[in-house]
Amino acid sequence: MAQHAIAIDGLAHIGIRVHDLARSVAFYQRLGFRKTAGPIGPEPVAILEHPSGIEINLVLNAPMSSEPNVLMDVEEKHPGITHFALLCRDLAAAMRELEAAGIALSGGPVRFETGDSAIFVRDPDRNVIELHQRA
C-alpha cells in the first residue's frame, strides 16, 4: 500500500520555552523580530514576527531564570530539537551587529562541505540559534 505525504505548505511558527518575557523579547528584537501579541492563553504565549515571515512563540513557562539547557548542556544526549537555523545573507555583517549588541557567539564561524557558513548564538534561556548563510 502506497503512503501519501501530508500536504505541508511551510513552517507556521517555532515555539521556544522562556523564563522572562522582557528579557527574551529584547534579545529577539536584536535579530529583527517584533512582538505582535501576548502574552495570551493558559501557558501563556507571546507572539513575535520577523519581516521575513518567520514567527516565533515565546512560551512563558520556564520556572528557572538560568539553568543548563538539557538538550545542549548535559553530557548525555536527549532526543529533541537542538537548535533552529535562520537564513542570513551576510554573516560578516551579522557578526558585527551581534558584537555591537554585546551578544557573544556560542559557536562558529564554521564552513560546511556544501560551502555554506554558520554562526551560533544562545538566547537568554540558552536556546541555540544558528545564523546560516548559503554558498
Image (cartoon, rainbow, N blue to C red):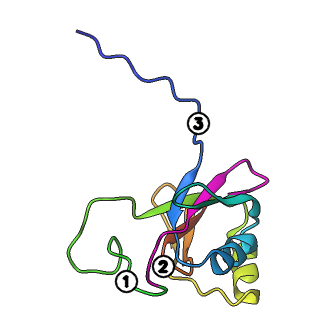
Instruction: Identify the disc placed on residue 10.
Output: 3
Residue 19 in view? yes
The amino acid at mark 1 is: Pro
Q: Measuring 52% from the left and 63% from the top, which residue is drawn there?
A: 16
Q: At numbered mark 1, what does the secondary structure look like: helix, strand or loop?
A: loop
Report how far apart the C-alphas of labels 1 and 3 lie in the structure: 31 Å
Residue count near mark 3 (Cα–Cα under 10 Å), binned few <14, some 14–19, many ≥20: few
Q: What is the x, y in percent for residue 24?
A: 63, 75
Q: Magenta region: which residues? A: 48-64
Q: Closest to the observer: 40 or 94?
A: 40
Residue 116 in view? no
- Residue denoted by label 2: 126
Q: In which image quadrant can residue 98 be found? A: bottom right
Between disc 1 and disc 3, whose residue precedes? 3
Q: Is residue 79 left or right of residue 52?
A: left
Whether pointer 2 and pointer 3 mark residues with C-beta atoms closer than 8 Å, the reply is no
Q: In which image quadrant can residue 78 be found? A: bottom left
Q: Closest to the observer: 70 or 18?
A: 18
Q: Closest to the observer: 22 or 3?
A: 22
